[in-house]
Image: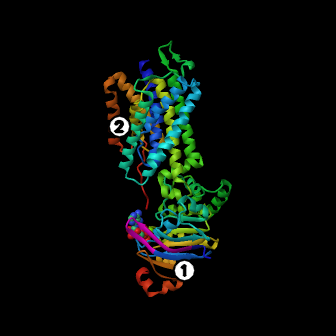
Amino acid sequence: MSMLEVSDLNVYYGSIHALKGISFNVEQGEIVTLIGANGAGKSTTLNTISGLLKPSSGKIRFEGESLVGVPAHKTVGKGIALCPEGRRVFLQMSVEENLDMGAYTRPDDEAAETKELVFKSFPRLLERRRQSAGTLSGGEQQMLAMGRALMSKPRLLMLDEPSMGLAPILVEEIFSIIEQLHDEGTTILLVEQNAQMALQIANRAYVLETGNISMEGPAEELAHDPRVQKAYLGG
Amino acid sequence: MGFVSNLVNGISLGAVYAIIALGYTMVYGIAKMLNFAHGDIIMVGGYLCFCSISYLGLNPFVSVLVSIVGCTVLGIVIERLAYKPLREAPSLDVLITAIGVSYLLQNTALLIWGSNPKSFPNLFKSLGNIRLFDGQLVISSTAIVTIATNIVIMLALTWFTSKTRMGKAMRACSEDKGAAQLMGINVNSTISLTFAIGSGLAAVAGVLLCSAYPTLMPTTGSMPGIKAFVAAVLGGIGSIPGAMVGGILLGVAEIFAKAYIGTQFSDAIVFALLIVVLLIKPTGILGKPISEKV
Ligand SMILES: Nc1ncnc2c1ncn2[C@@H]1O[C@H](COP(=O)(O)OP(=O)(O)O)[C@@H](O)[C@H]1O
Ligand SMILES: [Mg+2]
């Protein structure tokens, strides 16, 4: 049994058919990446898994349990955290309050332990813990968004374009943190437009094109596939 | 002494506006809607307290509690029945519904209590007025209770929103409901809680207002409701300290205008104040412009 199994998922925005029956799965301990151009349906996929969007049909199973119809505020308690596109940290709250919100469903003492681990992975957040999130740089906000997602101690971490809008040096840093989280045992579903970086760290990859999965396979293989190289790797 | 006495009266009236404005501003902050029925909750609070004292013979303290509980429940029920089904609807639809709820409350009150004004008892008489400077300056017990209540509410709300789990969840919802849900926050119950708190505060405001201005009618809540809305916008809608500053400022301006310019002009001056402030600072005195980082 896969950790996450998505099958035949259809999602509409009004009359726009954003996901046209996609199926994919994530095994425990993997990094799986979903790559594709802007508007392909990547965010829609993650938002549907997290319950923010309702699919019109299809199945989503996490650790054997169906997630369809589970409201968004209940999915985090099942062990899935989404670090959303554009970070969406609470700008008017302090760094520490943002992290506390990430552990909203957990008892305070357990959350305190996780917070120490998060501060260890992101020392810059520790330095700025009392600052409001709105005063952080883009890269720091991304770290905060990831730290906040980790505060729920997820078994599956979904990241929606964590490298978006960041300088190359920061992108490197974010990706090395993702690898580190993976080494520590978190399963990761990574959505990226930066296919180059994503394929480097992922075990497997799916290519999403206008609501359909057009290619899938080991990340290594896809990175060397001429079609992928042409469309997503600038060569 | 006239000046000081006017100032005290102004602060006291402003303290009531501020308590009402808190309800407006909290509901706006979270549900992003202007609850125009909020003023009428004040009126219901006044009647509940009046009935508990006059018909049921309860003591004033218990009567105030009855009024707070009654309005809290009313606020939750109104949200559930009238506003929740419109969560995804355009804001104009919600606004029209709120105006409808306002008329519904006023006319229900008219049916139950009739159009003759009730004379509200002075709940704080036994506390006695304070006389200073050989009786040249008299501060009424109602003014003192009103200002003290306002300070307690302000401190309690500040503590609630900055220190408690639920209060922080409320702030998270007001910034980004989607992200709040991803944290595990139930947005619907948070909105309910906000209506509950706002309506409970409206009951308190109703009792204080009727103690200071003892004619109670089905339309008693409308004008204070509108002025509190002005106060909330003046201070910066969505901001809790803003509601306080806006309320006090408005109350003082209104009493001074009445005392030194003329009763007929006082309301015009209040609204002129709003226009001037918004021209200078469109987000209100303490309102923050929302900036996003890329
Ligand atoms: N809120 C929305 N309302 C209507 N259409 C939307 C909305 N969000 C996304 N879409 C459409 O759904 C498709 C997939 O979008 P999205 O999942 O955001 O793509 P990606 O994350 O891959 O860039 C796009 O065609 C987009 O225009
Ligand atoms: Mg996207």
**Does label 1 lie on the same chain as label 2?**
no
- Say the numbered circle drawn on residue A128: none
Quarter of the image for residue B2 reads top left
Residue A162 in sight in this render:
no
* Chain part drawn in magenta: A5-20
Quadrant where ligand 2 appears: bottom left
For the residues marked 2 and 1, what is the alpha-carbon distance in whole angstroms?
60 Å
In the picture of the structure, the residue carrying the numbered disc 2 is B274
Kind of residue at disc 2:
Leu
Classed neighbour count for the residue bearing mark 1: other residues with Cα under 10 Å, few (<14), some (14–19), many (≥20): many
The chain carrying label 1 is A
Where the N terminus of chain B falls, by quadrant?
A: top left
Classed neighbour count for the residue bearing mark 2: other residues with Cα under 10 Å, few (<14), some (14–19), many (≥20): some
Residue A147: % across, % down: 57, 62
Toward the front, the furthest residue is: B111
Residue B61: % across, % down: 58, 27
Kind of residue at disc 1:
Arg
The chain carrying label 2 is B
Residue A1: % across, % down: 62, 76
Reply above or below: B236 against B182. above
